[in-house]
Image (cartoon, grey):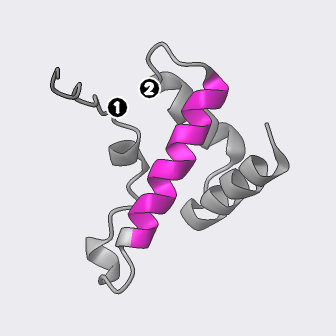
Amino acid sequence: MEVEIWEALDDICHRESLSIHEVCSMIDQRRHGSSRTSAVRAFIVTYFRAVAMDAGTPVQNRRAHGRLSELLTPRVRESPPAI
């Protein structure tokens, strides 16, 4: 993986007080059919999107910090309507 991906993963681990092994194990347990690298990248994007949406939100109502299991729940994207 790229240096930036490792740095982002390290930032998440620091924020969540978890080791890289713990976070990667959580990601690996919940990935469905995608590569591990792809699952890690998708998780990092999902995590930081949640952090960005939390700006200005009281800590107890934040979506990212302390709620990794929720962020690891796979989402299915609906197919666009046929033209």
Most extreme residue toward the top is 33
Tell me how far mark 2 sits from mark 1, CA to CA. Answer: 7 Å
Instruction: Confirm whether residue 65 shows in the render.
Output: no
Q: In what element is the residue under mark 1? A: loop
| Residue 52 x, y percent position in the rendering | 44, 71
Front residue of 57/1: it is 1
Horizontal side of 74 relative to 24 (left or right) equals left
Quadrant where the N terminus is found in the figure: top right
| Residue 59 x, y percent position in the rendering | 35, 79
Residue drawn at 59 percent across, 66 percent down = 15
Residue drawn at 61 percent across, 58 percent down = 12
Residue that carries the numbered disc 2 in the rendered image? 30
Going by the numbered disc 2, the residue's amino acid type is Arg
In this rendering, which labeled residue sits more in front, label 2 or label 1? 1
Horizontal side of 35 relative to 76 (left or right) equals right
Residue drawn at 48 percent across, 55 percent down = 47
Going by the numbered disc 1, the residue's amino acid type is Pro
| Residue 3 x, y percent position in the rendering | 84, 49
Q: In what element is the residue under mark 2? A: helix
Ranked by sequence position, the earlier of labels 2 and 1 is 2
Front residue of 61/6: it is 6
Q: Is residue 25 above or below residue 58?
A: above
Residue that carries the numbered disc 1 in the rendered image? 74
Give the extent of the magenta segment: 36-52
Q: Is residue 76 above or below residue 61?
A: above
Residue drawn at 55 percent across, 31 percent down = 39
42 inside magenta stretch: yes
Asked if marks 2 and 1 touch (Cβ < 8 Å), the reply is yes
Q: Give me the disc on residue 13.
A: none
Q: Is residue 52 above or below residue 24?
A: below
Front residue of 11/17: it is 11
